[in-house]
Amino acid sequence: MRFPRWLLSDRTGLVLLAVLMIIGIGVPALNLLVPPDHPLHLTAYTVTLLGKYLCYALLAVSIDLVWGYMGILSLGHAAFFTLGGYCFGMYMMRQIGTRGVYGDPVLPDFMVFLNWKDLPWYWHSFDMFWFAALMVMVVPGLLAFIFGWFAFRSRVSGVYLSIITQALTYALMLAFFRNEMGFGGNNGLTDFKDILGYSIHADETRIVLFVLSALALAGGYLACRWLVSTRMGRVLVAIRDSEDRTRFLGYRVEQVKTLVFTFSAMLAGVAGALYVPQVGIINPGEFAPLNSIEAVIWVAVGGRGTLVGAVVGAVLVNYSKSWLTAALPEVWLFALGGLFVAVTLLLPYGLIGLLRRRRETAS
Amino acid sequence: MSELIFEPEAAGMHTPVAPVDATHGILLYLEGVTVSFDGFKAIDNLSLYIGDGELRCIIGPNGAGKTTMMDIITGKTKPDAGRVFFGQTIDLLKLDEPAIARIGIGRKFQKPTVIEPLTVLENLELAMSGAKRLRGLMTTRMSGEERDRISAVLDQVGLNEQAQRLAGVLAHGQKQWLEIGMLLMQEPRLLLVDEPVAGMTPAEMERTAELLKSLAGNHSVVVVEHDMGFVRSIADQVTVLHQGRVLAEGRLDELQVDPLVIEVYLGGEDAHH
Ligand SMILES: Nc1ncnc2c1ncn2[C@@H]1O[C@H](COP(=O)(O)OP(=O)(O)O)[C@@H](O)[C@H]1O
Ligand SMILES: [Mg+2]
């Protein structure tokens, strides 16, 4: 097999793909093949935790594409992630069927509880896996398209755009908190049982979800890397550095922005859809503005405009978070804020930038 | 998303398909153009005609409206009144910036604007592809013909040696040439060049003069410039702009003895040079 040049010249990317391949094979092996009492055995809990990190990493990659390359600081990307999660959650809710507390064959428990008689129209078809899998991308993509169409066409950019994206995710949070919306109100969607007939509590299902997350991250990374290696990638950088110049070269900047923003939202949606079955719940809290800001910090920590940095940042920050929220829960937000300030001041190109500088001074 | 995605053939949303018609010898018409910012008339009933293949210099004190005039021609600012035509048939006021770029008007900004994280070659490639639709942009390859076009422009602007360097590390003068090169990649009929030699060394200025003179004939070139020596070295036809109007038009040596021009511009300019 011959690798194309755009991939071969991307050394850190090849390292990332190799690592993903190793853990994609190694983690399942350590869970399934190593006996539970052996020190090298990985519990299903750990596998799922790692799977979550991979979903976060894919979200970070999607943010880096629009922020690092095109200069759009979206502080609302968790909204696309969460919408993807809700879409897949709806599928899993419909799979529960008569096994719910109220045993209604069609209506999810929370609807029975609200005394609803019929399934709302937008819940139809979500009992079909393929439909839900499609909606996971279509719904966030459509929202991003409509949002981008209006925001970019009226040439909203910079801080104003960031604020609107915050408002977008906040508005969605408020809406999803309401019971009348039909998404389970503040409890969200939970008590999932199975996917395509496989129990989501079975180790094997968790392994499959983990491997799928690794594949999605690898695929998302490759798609973004390819995109930024094409001429379109150069256009994105040009838009970031000088929107006017790009326009006077004949590019329809708002169309390019809308297009790439939509693609990015679809990636975030996929990440959310893989995340929800692994954590077993999705609720409106995931729309919280802070979640989107956190995700941007992962990218900044890893190194903006590198794609690999987004992955590194997402995994490292979330690993620290798991560790710190267990050890010193009240410190976490301060640590996150401090980290962001430190990175902005000391490492403008993030951890990947630090690595690159090391290598350049070494050679 | 109009043509970028769906439209099969056309090059731009409102881009006229017919080529520019300059049969009367005039490529650009500005007639009675007025634009005000918060009541202040930056351009005041301005009329100006640029001939096909002509090299025209526009001079005038700071704030005379030179950059604003370029903003109007390139679609960045819409005037309150007046007509702006490209050739006989194309009404520029109906087009937006990308469409105007695609029909053959290239613009160099007052502040040199090249894409610094990209190489010289990539900057030229970027400029070459401005008229392309989505499929043409989704490629990592360059055709032989495209390579030839880029290397021809590299020769023309004298940046052959620099092709693989990042635009950000170029000297000031080289950035200006690169930006002119980017305009040439667009194959424009009209080039608008805003203060090309500001901050250049005398040697760089001389090369820039040669470059701009070599472009006239095949292209119409409008140069806004402050430096009198430079203006003298490139153009014989000069327009003096003052408070958004044409104050005088003619040969530089005539203008330099025109009392009106001396009063508002040349005198003052010499005084602080
Ligand atoms: N977008 C704008 N808003 C308000 N005033 C402007 C704007 N653009 C230009 N002006 C004003 O219009 C006048 C002409 O500016 P400009 O065209 O840049 O002059 P020049 O390029 O000849 O130095 C100046 O007084 C400037 O302050
Ligand atoms: Mg100016």
Image (cartoon, coloured by chain):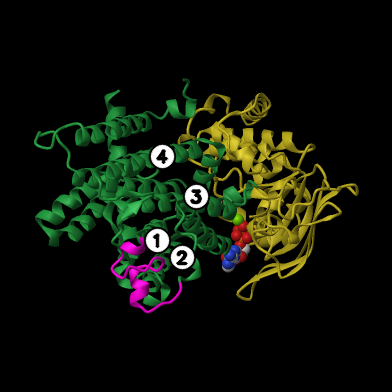
Chain colours: A green, B yellow
Find residue A267 and report its horizontal and vertical position in percent. Answer: 43, 49
Are discs 2 and 1 less than 8 Å apart at CB? yes
Q: Are marks 4 and 1 on the same chain?
A: yes
What is the CA distance from the residue labelled 4 to the residue labelled 1?
Answer: 32 Å
Above or below for B115 versus A119: above
Nearer the observer, disc 3 or disc 1?
1
What is the CA distance from the residue labelled 3 to the residue labelled 1?
Answer: 28 Å
Nearer the observer, disc 4 or disc 2?
2
For disc 4, the marked residue is A221
Q: Residue at x 63, y 76 (%)?
A: B39
Are discs 4 and 2 less than 8 Å apart at CB? no
What is the CA distance from the residue labelled 3 to the residue labelled 2?
Answer: 24 Å
Range shown magenta = A97-118
Find residue B180 and report its horizontal and vertical position in percent. Answer: 63, 39
Q: In the rendered structure, the residue with mark 2 lies on which chain?
A: A
Find residue A165 and report its horizontal and vertical position in percent. Answer: 43, 63
Horizontally, residue B216 falls left or right of residue A329, namely: right
Nearer the observer, disc 3 or disc 2?
2
For disc 3, the marked residue is A263
Q: Residue at x 20, y 37 (%)?
A: A31
Q: State yes or no: residue B89 in magenta.
A: no
Q: In the rendered structure, the residue with mark 1 lies on which chain?
A: A
Horizontally, residue A172 falls left or right of residue A205, namely: right
Q: Can residue A306 be seen by looking at this rendering?
A: no
For disc 2, the marked residue is A123
Nearer the observer, disc 4 or disc 1?
1
What is the CA distance from the residue labelled 4 to the residue labelled 2?
Answer: 32 Å
